[in-house]
Image (cartoon, rainbow, N blue to C red):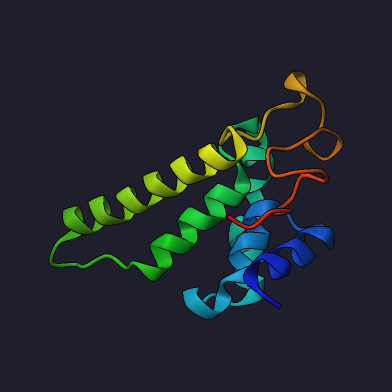
Amino acid sequence: MNRYEKATAYHHQGFNCCQSVLAAYTDLTGLTEQASFDLGGGFGAGAQTGELCGAITGAIMTLGMITPVNPEDPVGSKRRTGALAKAFQARFREKFGEVRCRPPAEGGHPRRRQHPRGPGHGPDQPL
């Protein structure tokens, strides 16, 4: 099963997008599946604000885990990871049209509306 399929399977079990993406990358991040679920738990539905999509949040957390901070150069490390995060968000926006998980006032509960990634509001399409 590839990471896209893993993330989709987790999402279909009821985990939010951030949890699903984090859990699909445990082999690279060193997090346990449970730690991924715990860490990403509050980031569903744009951290419950409808803002930055939880799949993006999970992906950026994953980028942070696989590009660790160099204690000798924290500013350079921060810039490197920040550039990766910015590039990822640009690719996401290009593919799906937005990076927000819109709040209910703009289209209903996330699970009941069309999400940029497709029906069912989940990681339904690999980047």
The foreground one among 48 and 60 is 60
The foreground one among 49 and 25 is 25
Q: How many marks?
A: 0
Q: Position of residue 11 (x, y in %)?
A: 77, 58
Left or right: 106 as drawn, with respect to 88: right
| Residue shown at 68% from the left, 46% from the top | 44
Q: Is residue 93 above or below residue 39?
A: above
Q: Position of residue 17 (x, y in %)?
A: 68, 52
The foreground one among 77 and 115 is 115
Q: Is residue 75 above or below residue 2?
A: above
Quadrant of image for the C terminus: bottom right
Left or right: 107 as drawn, with respect to 37: right
| Residue shown at 31% from the left, 49% from the top | 83
Left or right: 19 as drawn, with respect to 84: right
Q: Is residue 117 above or below residue 112?
A: below
| Residue shown at 40% from the left, 70% from the top | 66
The quarter holding residue 32 reads: bottom right
Q: Position of residue 13 (x, y in %)?
A: 84, 63
